[in-house]
Amino acid sequence: MVVLSFLLAFSMAVPLAMTYDHIEFASEGTIVGKRCGKIKYDSDIDGAAYGIVYLSVNFLILVSFIFLYGRIGCNIYGHLKRNNRVKNKFTLMFMIITLVFAVSVIPVGIILTLEGIMHDFWDNLSRNQLIVVLWLYHTYLINNFINPIIYAFLDPEFWKATKTLFKCVCKVNRTQEP
């Protein structure tokens, strides 16, 4: 599974090296700076191909999350017949992880597709639009740092260890006060 994940990530990253370069971009007629951006193509479909593939692959990943988490949920429900609290925590955790993945990946795919179709996509944005689009362009990072937090805070062992840590820290602070 790790090798498959690596191959998928590698196959999604390689086209970026061939289709992106440093591009000057302007906002409201003045050059703002350079950014890593898509090389302009003669054909709209050539430019949009990576965005479409990106959205399609991430849609398949989202569907697989729903399917696999559903299977895990069925197993949990079968083994934990009486403990509804644990069932609800797992269900909530899987739903949040799937939702965060969708919210963090879909805007990036849409922007990748739009910049491939519209050759002057970045040039026609106002300064405020540019700020919003650049923020949306980097929402994939949300998934990377939120997932460990979700797993950690919905895990009872993590909470127990956190409480123990804070008790120790508070105890040390009390003994050091005059």
Image: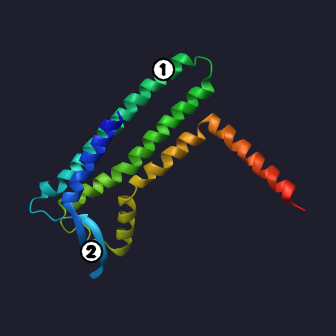
Q: CA distance from mark 2 to mark 1?
A: 52 Å
Q: Position of residue 162 (x, y in %)?
A: 68, 44
Q: Quadrant of residue 137?
A: bottom left
Instruction: Say which residue appears at 39% left-offset and 53% top-offset.
Output: 140
The answer to whether 96 appears left or right of 122 in the picture is right
Q: Quadrant of the C terminus?
A: bottom right
Who's the residue at 39% across and 29% down the image? Answer: 68
> Could you say where residue 114 lies in the image, as x and y percent from the top left?
24, 58
Label 1 residue SS: helix
Residue bearing mark 2:
25
**Which label belongs to residue 75?**
1
Residue drawn 27% across and 74% down? 25
In the rendered view, would you say 107 is above or below 80? Answer: below
- Mark 1: give few (<14), some (14-19) or many (20+) Cα within 10 Å: few
Q: Position of residue 156 (x, y in %)?
A: 64, 34
As helix, strand or loop, the secondary structure at mark 2 comes to strand
The color scheme shown is: rainbow
Q: Residue furthest right?
A: 178
Comes first in the chain, label 2 or label 1 = 2
- Left or right of residue 56, residue 79 in this image: right
Q: 26 and 150: which one is in front?
A: 150
Q: Residue at x 62, y 28 (%)?
A: 85
Residue contact between numbered discs 2 and 1, judged by CB atoms under 8 Å: no
| Side of 90 relative to 108 (left or right) | right
Q: Is residue 77 left or right of residue 125?
A: right
Give, as a three-letter code, the residue at label 1: Asn
Question: Residue at the bottom extreme?
Answer: 30
Farthest-out residue, left? 42
- What's the amino acid at mark 2? Phe
Q: Is residue 25 above or below residue 42?
A: below
